[in-house]
Image (cartoon, helix red, strand yellow):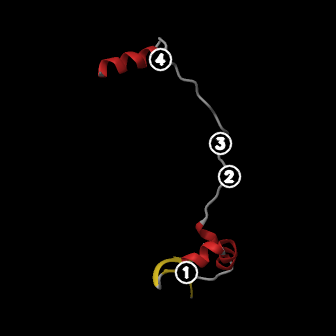
Amino acid sequence: METISISRLKAHLSAELKRIEGGLVLTVVDHKRPVAILSPLHEDTLFVREATSLYSCKSFEPLIDEDAMVFLNEERTDSW
């Protein structure tokens, strides 16, 4: 397991992530104090499945019949 400073990780993030993706485990240190461990994800941790049904959308009836702004303004005046 290698260690890397936060400043070096920030400067070389893409390259270090490629190394991690290849199997490297990195310990991130801040002033020689370990603060995080970066390790590759295992392939079985990501779960993706096909959709079982088609997308559908339902329309709902409005809860109020008047203009929403009128209702909102009435509610605001009541609170003052």
> What is the distance, in whole Å, between disc 2 and disc 3 at their CAs?
9 Å
Among the 4 quarters of the image, the one containing residue 8: bottom right
Where residue 14 sits in the image (x, y, percent)? 68, 71
Q: Residue at x 65, y 81 (%)?
A: 23
Q: Is residue 77 left or right of residue 60?
A: left
Label 3 or label 1, whichever lies nearer to me, is 1
Q: Earlier in the sequence, mark 1 or mark 2?
A: 1
> What is the distance, in whole Å, between disc 2 and disc 4 at their CAs?
42 Å
Q: Earlier in the sequence, mark 3 or mark 1?
A: 1
- Classify 10 Å Cα crowding around label 1: few (below 14), some (14-19), many (20 and above): some
Q: Amino acid at mark 1?
A: Ser
Among the 4 quarters of the image, the one containing residue 22: bottom right
Which labelled disc corresponds to residue 69?
4
Up/down of 58 relative to 72, above or below: below
Which labelled disc corresponds to residue 50?
2
Where residue 5 sits in the image (x, y, percent)? 55, 81
**Tag 1's secondary structure?**
strand
Q: Earlier in the sequence, mark 3 or mark 4?
A: 3
Whether residue 35 is visible = yes
Whether residue 42 is visible = no
Q: Earlier in the sequence, mark 2 or mark 4?
A: 2
Q: Residue at x 61, y 61 (%)?
A: 47
Residue bearing the label numbered 1: 5
Q: Quadrant of the N terminus?
A: bottom right
Where residue 51 sits in the image (x, y, percent)? 66, 48
Which of the pair 7/20 is nearer the observer? 7
Up/down of 62 relative to 42, above or below: above
Which labelled disc corresponds to residue 53?
3
